[in-house]
Image (spheres, rainbow, N blue to C red):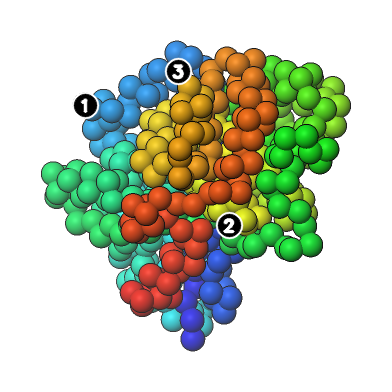
Amino acid sequence: MVRLLIFTYAAAGLGHLRVTGALVSGRPRNHSYELLGTSDPMVTKIHRLTSINPIAKKIGEAFQYGLLEDIFTKAYVWYLRHNTKEVYERVLHMIEEKPDAEGVTIVATHFGLAHQIAEIKNKIKRKTGKQVDVVVQVTDDTSQHIWCVRGADITFVPSQQTKEELEVYAKQQGINIHAEVSPYPTNPSFAKKIERSIETREEAFKKGSDRPINVIVPISGAAVGLKYLTKFLLELDRSSKKFHFWIVAKRSDQTKRFLSTIGKLRWIQLITGRSDNETVGLYEKVYRENLIHAEVTKPSEQAFKALIPPTMIGGSVLLFTEPIGRQEKDNIVFLKRHKLLVEDEDIKEKMTGESHYPRGVLLPLDPKNAARCVLTCMDDEYFKKMTADFSYSPESMMSSEISERGTWLFWEQLRLLGMI
């Protein structure tokens, strides 16, 4: 007999869905699984409002630090743990539908459901007579206190720094937390070698090459930064004929105008999904079916695609837009610590005498300057060096934070702990 796996996620951006999808794809194949999502419209509205409205953004960020963070965390956790009836009934139904499962492992990629599941874990055990383990995967390299889940059996974090900071907070609050550092789980299909019959990325980045450069632009769930992207992409297209753009977005009122405007680019594929899940699937499909050279993206969970080398399917050059919120700023710090990111003003310095090239570039805040930055990197063959001469620093390789096999390592650790 094997365990039933239950994956929980929230409709607060596409990041949680992508991480959930990666873990589902890499799961042991003999284990059946169920998906438990929350479609709380309030969570979605708050996420979108604090992502695009300048005033709401500042208020939202204020509640991610210091005293306000502590107040918010305590209030929200209290709310979550006192509103578990629906979640309990749904989980119980899933378990009852799989009577042969010897136990249950519930994987949470969003703190909301993580707190609720941890609250009802013992109640489910008593009701079903089965062992129930709650696994939390932190989806950014952030030590925000909301990720400290009382009752979770194990919490995976992307770095030692985040582990130590969460442990300090847990000790202050009297919470017993078992945190483990494990490389961020990315989709296993992205970590496959590019077939020899396909050209390498560096060939398209060679100066004078007539090969097109395929650029993918996934639009975030909150449809953030569309004005910036519009100006940036139009300027790139105006300045060079080399770019082929793949825009992946969910069809919605928020993206309708953007998709109409951006459709004027010389070579473009507009790929739209009707739902969040479909949109995530379409994004992964583009990578599987095309050699993508560069990706324009937010430094959300997408930042951890920097753990995938350029020789692999998902190893495109990463062009990051402005970080929004504490978690994205924390991800930028992670990338810089491992020398995986360079900022515009540092590129010339990095191009001379550098033995370890980064995986990504943090674009300037002005979209026209961002376009000029990309064109300069092409003219000076910096992108070619990033794809042809890339290697992780010795310090990073010695850490337990860097590997494209994060999903496999996640499941291997659970196997060793007897949770699968």
Q: What residue is drawn where x is 64% and y is 41%?
A: 384
- Residue 271: x and y, percent? 78, 40
Residue at the spot of label 1: 67
- Graded by Cα atoms within 10 Å as few (under 14), some (14 to 19) or many (20 or more), the crowding at tag 1 reads few
Q: Quarter of the image containing the C terminus? A: bottom left
State which tag comes first along the sequence, 1 or 2.
1
Between marks 3 and 2 in the image, the one whose residue lies nearer the viewer: 2
Cβ–Cβ below 8 Å for labels 3 and 2? no
Residue at the spot of label 3: 56
Q: Which element type, helix, strand or loop, lies under badge 2?
A: loop
State the image quarter where residue 409 is shown. Answer: bottom left
State which tag comes first along the sequence, 3 or 2.
3
Q: What residue is drawn where x is 63% and y is 25%?
A: 376
- Tell me, for residue 97, which label it has, or none: none
Q: Amino acid at mark 3?
A: Ala
Residue at the spot of label 2: 187
State the image quarter where residue 102 is shown. Answer: bottom left
Q: Is residue 360 above or below residue 160?
A: above
Mark 3 and mark 2: Cα distance apart in space: 32 Å
Q: What residue is drawn where x is 14% and y is 49%?
A: 171
- Residue 155: x and y, percent? 33, 57
Q: Amino acid at mark 1?
A: Leu
Mark 1 and mark 2: Cα distance apart in space: 36 Å
Residue found farthest to the front: 353
- 23 relative position to 339: left or right: right
